[in-house]
Each structure stands twice: as structure tokens, then as C-alpha cells.
Image (spheres, rainbow, N blue to C red):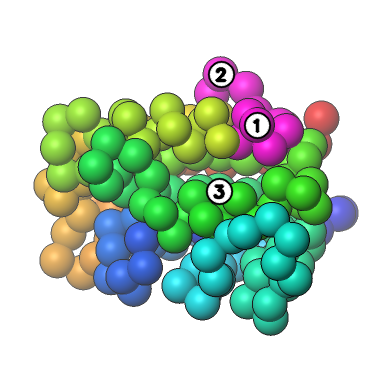
Amino acid sequence: MKRFNILGISGSLRPDSTNTVILRAFEAFLPANTNFKIFHGLDEIPHFSPGLDDTAAVTAFKTAIQQADGVIICTPEYAFGVPGTLKNALDWTVASGDLNDKPVSAVSASPLNTGGEKALASLLLTLTALGTRKNDDSSLSIPNIKHKIDANQQVSDQETLVALRHQIDNLLAIIAS
């Protein structure tokens, strides 16, 4: 049975962020033949500027993407968009095409009723520009996230868990196609 590698990328730099909690929740739904790794180091990636050489941090980010069969990005919404560090990291992949034809799932989570829908829309535009593979089921907006995570820093809301399972099942189906 073929092994799959899934890469999780959190748009938040905080280790205890709800977005990282959500990424960790995906692990429970992965089949035994799937490896899951969350990338750490967005804060080490320098500001993107065309013509700059890749740094060690940029190379690590690109290598993690290249080694993944699929990518899950979970982001908060800051000022109606994705955090600058996440957008910056994605910009480093434009010329290299590392995300081109890569199956992706995009998730936004917010303590607000909107679920970070503007950040999600922005992320989806960027992922489209990068040539990723996704379908109508490749995104999820999670509103009121603070009420869906328990004191142990785990997703506890059953509806959210079902939606996360659907995201991983959809991503794996895109990878297999």
C-alpha cells in the first residue's frame, strides 16, 4: 500500500494557536498509510523579493512542500486577510512552482461568527494563482472556534470534527485521482 505524506501549515506562529490545534486534530482521521507533519518555521522565512536566493528556511519550506502528496493550510484572519507570514511563505513558491498541481485543503478559523471567511477567500485566490489542485469541497470556514476547543487544547465540537474528517477524506481523494 502506497504511503502518503500530508503537510500541515498553520498561518499562526503561536504554538498554542487554534489553527495549530485544528491541524493536530486532522491526525485522528488519517489512514495508517499516511504520514502527517506540521511545518514549523514560517517566522524564519525572510521577506520575499524576486531575485533573492533561497535561504535555509525557504529551502526547508519548499522541501517540505515537495515531499508532501497533499497540503492542509489552516489560517486565522488578520485585518480581513491571511497573516503576512503565511502569504510571504507562499509567495516564495511562485517562481519555483512547488505548489503547482499539489492537492490542497484550505481551512480558516476565527473566534468570530464569520469564521475567517475573508482570509479563506484570500487564501483560495492565492492557491488558485499557485496552480494547486482543489475542488468545491477543498475549503472549510470554522466560526466561533474558541467554543469548539476544550481545556485540553483539542477540538471537541462534533460538527467541526465531522467537517475536518470530510476535509481529509476529500484531500486524500484528490491525491488518489
Q: Is residue 174 above or below residue 48?
A: above
Residue matched to label 1:
129
* Residue at 36 percent of width and 61 percent of height: 12
Query: Looking at this view, is 69 or 47 the one in front?
Result: 47
Q: In which quadrant is the N terminus drawn?
A: bottom right
SS label for mark 1: helix
Q: Which residue is mark 2?
A: 136
Q: Is residue 141 magenta?
A: no
User: Disc 3 vs disc 1: Cβ atoms closer than 8 Å?
Assistant: no
Q: Residue at x 69, y 56 (%)?
A: 50
**67 relative position to 48: left or right:** right
Q: Amino acid at mark 1?
A: Ala
Element assignment for label 3: strand
Q: How many marks?
A: 3
Q: Amino acid at mark 2?
A: Asp
For label 3, the residue is 72
Residue visible at 51% across and 77% down?
44
Q: Nearer the viewer, residue 113 or 31?
A: 113
Q: Position of residue 6 (x, y in %)?
A: 66, 56
Report, in whole angstroms, how far the alpha carbon at label 3 lies from the one at label 1: 17 Å
Highlighted range, magenta? 127-137
Q: Marks 2 and 3, Cα distance to the nearest angstrom?
A: 15 Å
Task: Indicate the quadrant where residue 138 lies.
Answer: top right
